Image (tube, rainbow, N blue to C red):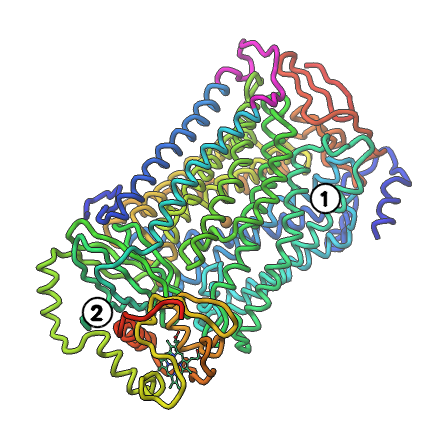
Amino acid sequence: MSVTTVERASADEPPETEPSYLTAENTISSWLLTRDHKRIALLFFASITFFFFVGGMAATLMRLNLATPEGLLQPSVYNRMFTMHGIIMVWFFLIPSIPTTFGNFFIPLMIGARDLAFPRVNLGSWYVFNLSGLVVLYSLVMGGADTGWTFYTPLSTSFANGYVFAAAMAVFINGFSSIMTSLNFVVTIHRLRAPGMTWMRLPLFVWGIYSVSVVMLTATPVLTMDTFLLAVERFVGTGLFDPAHGGDVLLWQHMFWFYSHPAVYIMILPAMGVISEIIPCYARRPIFGYAGMVIALMAIAILSFFVWAHHMFVAGISIYSAVFFSLMTFFVAVPSAIKVFNWTVSLHKGSISFDAPMLYALGFVLLFTVGGVTGLMLATLPVDVDVHGTYFVIAHFHYIMVGATVSAYFAALHYWWPKITGRYYPEGWARFSAILTYVGFNFTFFPQFILGYLGMARRSYTYPADWQSWNLLSSAGASILAVAYALPLLYLGWSLIWGRKAGPNPWRATGLEWAIASPPPEHNFERTPTVTLEPYSYDPEHGSFVTQEGRSHAR
Amino acid sequence: MYRWIPFWPDTAAVNAIAVNNIYIAELALSSLITLTVAFMLLTFSIRYRRGSTASRANLVQKTWHFEVGWTTATLGLFLILFVYGASMYIWLYNPPPADEEIYVVGKRWMWKAEHPGGQREIDALHVPIDKTIRLVLASEDVIHSFFVPAFRIKHDVVPGALETIWFKANKTGTFRLACTQFCGLQHATMAGEVVVMSGPDYARWLGDQGVRESFAEQGSELFRAHGCSGCHSENSTVHAPLLDGVYGTFVHMQDGSVRFADEAYLRDCIVNPRSFTVAGYPPVMPDYAGQLGEDELLKVIAYIKSIGSKRETGR
Ligand SMILES: [Cu+2]
Ligand SMILES: [Cu+2]
């Protein structure tokens, strides 16, 4: 299959005035059966946007409930809401978010390829994803699972009475979609780079997707086995996780976190890639320490496999393994610190403008820093013993996964919007929602650090009355955040019809994706581009830049 | 404690003071790092905004000196935090000799505490001040997590295992006790209170509970009722080890391995005897899994711990 694709990439040049990928064909089946990576990216975009709002609805209900200690929801409903919020946000939004949409759309464009290596697998991945989505919706509509997204045994195997089996199966099926997509990226990045696009000339977004694909490809099969064993145990009682039958309840946690810790990095690595594209473009200068950034990405990808037991410091693992995993967790923080430092220095002597993508990106750096330093606190064993299982942890990972990743997602959405649709987004509105996101986010999640240290347990539908002020503040912040996340849907939708038309390179950026028309023609490149330069050849002193193909543009 | 806007939890145990200190140190460091990043972002953003006249000559794209220096500094700092934390963790999770041992059983959705004197309480735990209290934690169903924020201690309570944790309260008062591992419907209300009392008050409280039998005595009765004494006694016809003083020793196994006889080991002997055999004995010990409830097991274990202490180690 790969052979035919490679051939197609080099042979039969498309005609000069090829229609854009959006208008090339207009039937429904031309969308549902498309093998064009750009259209598949949009299909994924539709699916995950849907799930983002489903997961968001669950979060809204949770924050509504927590506004008062008495609450609104039945305890059983609340328990199902946070479980489904976690499952949907992790597997149906965050993990696929950037790779399946912007990765799908831009990896081929950025490396100068006609498509991904396996276009049919790519389409298949979307169908598998939707199948798993149907299963998770089934679980939700029937009443939801009530175990938390972590499915801890023996609660999930012998006690919970919600739709745990369906939820676990949804995760099981979802894994195949992850594997199909990541395999496709790895092969594509290895095999289909345009002449001259050496590894050290790859844009950092491509490196981000590459590193995440390697992690997905190696970690996901463990989750697949794990959820399978869980389902079997729940159905026939194999006893693998049941101490009464000689099983071990902690075995589940080890297997689960062996996947799910790397999964945290699956959610953040592509975001790091996005930010590394945007900061140089709006600061008009090369990224600081390109090689360091690449090394950091790959170091995170590898080290992320050796930290899983930091989720189990209070679970009864041996003291010595706890010490080892704490040390590894500090190690994995080093490359993350390097990245923050390099992004910051990448502003030095720049010529910075503050368009919406840049505002989102700057917000990302700050929120990621807060998430990172609190991660260090959690890596410190006695502090983790104290705050494990409290709102401190909730706040910490939302800073990383929502504050950072979702901001990067919106940054990418705005940055590449003109390329994807051929239209500008309305700048004023976009800046407004970028700032609103930042404000709403901090109001929502900062109080949760305080609540956590006070001792408020996560996954609680109620809490002692004297903690209400912080909870109320958090709920109020969440309502701001909800507006900030819903706004882009409106004005981006508006811009599809009334937005100003954008040229091929509206941001004067250097990547190959900007060398072709907006929206891109169906077969991407008229002729395969030749790359002569590393990315980000911006010159802030003269306001000029040179594209990766070596074409220089004056001010 | 019940202020309108609480910022900081009580600090009411020696463990809590240590953890609190490291938390404050890290909080200060974290704020410093975050503020530095924020400050740099802000100054660069202002100084190098588009259209400003600041010079952009001699742009630095990379400097290995700087990057290696920065990386080493970060690594060094992290290693200090690691060592600080790890040594404290070892201290926190290695119970020192206890003045008093209390058994706690987590059950959906309540905490049951059993004092050595046989006093029982539910969703409450009365302890004396300035004494090292060791808790033995057991679960009857799913994983729970025993958490007292004011003491900064927490440990999961895992079915099929016995975990231990300790604290030494240094303030009298009433403090929250919570479960931090989601355990089903009423997880949020699986809470209680820890009451720290002065020595005399505590003694009075113990006396007021009106119990006749100590925890170990109750275990001794179970030991007879379930036939353990038929094998594990001087005049038994079965070749079974005497249990006097086995607690706290190293036991040699048939397969050559050595196990330390703590509570978790004793529990294993009773509910999981098929999985190992003590060296020199026939594997005839019956499996009691399912016959003894979690708190009965704790009673039997307390009894075994209470008998004899003069036994040569490493038999
Ligand atoms: Cu982790
Ligand atoms: Cu609980």
Quarter of the figure with residue A12: top right
In the rendered structure, find residue B116 and report the number of the disc placed on it.
2
Q: Nearer the viewer, residue B100 or A488?
A: B100
Quarter of the figure with residue A230: bottom right
Quadrant of image for the C terminus of chain A: top right
Residue that mark 1 sits on: A38
- Residue A323 lies left or right of residue A530; in this view the side is left
> Where does the magenta region start and end?
B46-66
Residue at horizontal 69%, vertical 55%? Answer: A125
| Secondary-structure class at tag 1 | helix
Q: Position of residue A302 (x, y in %)?
A: 61, 44
- State yes or no: residue A16 in magenta: no
Whether residue A435 is situated above or below residue A399 in the rendered picture: above
- Residue A68 lies left or right of residue A357; in this view the side is left
| Dominant SS type (magenta) | loop
Q: Hey, what amino acid is under mark 1?
A: Lys
